Image (spheres, rainbow, N blue to C red):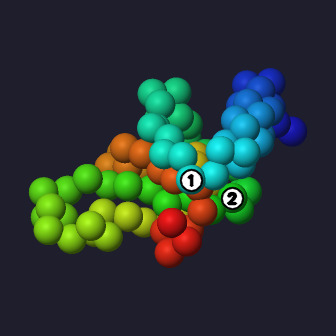
Amino acid sequence: MLSKSSLAFCFLFILISAFAQASTGRKFQCQPLQRKISVCPDVHWPVCGFKPSMECQEDPNCGYKNYNNECEACIDPEVVSYTLGNCEEI
């Protein structure tokens, strides 16, 4: 059985995801609340996460990685933003 806080998070995640799906092509910044999540829902809404790196200054495709959803992208401490869809589609 899920705790009340887990259920609340899942509801919030679905609500945010529904809004985000309507905003395809837009870049989203990872928020502090997203960083505090310890377990992400098993939902496949692919996003392309961006990890800035000094090594990538010459290569515009460097620093991008596919994630199953925005939750998985933003719990990675190196990811600062994400775009909806796989990196290859953007």
Determine which residue is flagged by label 2: 45
Mark in front: 1 vs 2: 1
From this viewpoint, which residue is outermost toward the bottom? 88
Give, as a three-letter code, the residue at label 2.
Trp
Residue 31 or 86: which is nearer the viewer? Answer: 86
Instruction: Tell me what residue is drawn at x 69 percent, y 58 percent.
Output: 45
Instruction: Tell me what residue is drawn at x 18 percent, y 64 percent.
Output: 56
The quarter of the displayed image where residue 62 is located: bottom left
61 sits left or right of 75 in the view: left
Task: Judge the density around disc 2: few (<14), some (14-19), many (≥20) Cα neighbours within 10 Å.
Answer: some
Task: Quadrant for the N terminus, please.
Answer: top right
Residue 29 seen in this snapshot: yes
Instruction: Tell me what residue is drawn at x 50 percent, y 41 percent.
Output: 28
Q: Evaluate if marks 1 and 2 touch, with contact meaning CB atoms under 8 Å apart.
A: no
The quarter of the displayed image where residue 32 is located: top left
Question: With respect to residue 46, does 29 lie above or below?
Answer: above
Number of marks drawn: 2
Q: Earlier in the sequence, mark 1 or mark 2?
A: 1
Residue 10 seen in this snapshot: no
Residue 72 or 84: which is nearer the viewer? Answer: 84
Task: Judge the density around disc 1: few (<14), some (14-19), many (≥20) Cα neighbours within 10 Å.
Answer: some
Gap in angstroms between the C-alphas marked 1 and 2 = 14 Å
Res. 25 mark: 1
Give, as a three-letter code, the residue at label 1.
Gly
Image location (x, y in percent) of residue 76: 42, 50
Report helix, strand or loop for mark 2.
Answer: loop
Question: With respect to residue 49, does 75 lie above or below?
Answer: above
Report helix, strand or loop for mark 1.
Answer: loop
Image location (x, y in percent) of residue 68: 61, 62
Image location (x, y in percent) of residue 20: 67, 42
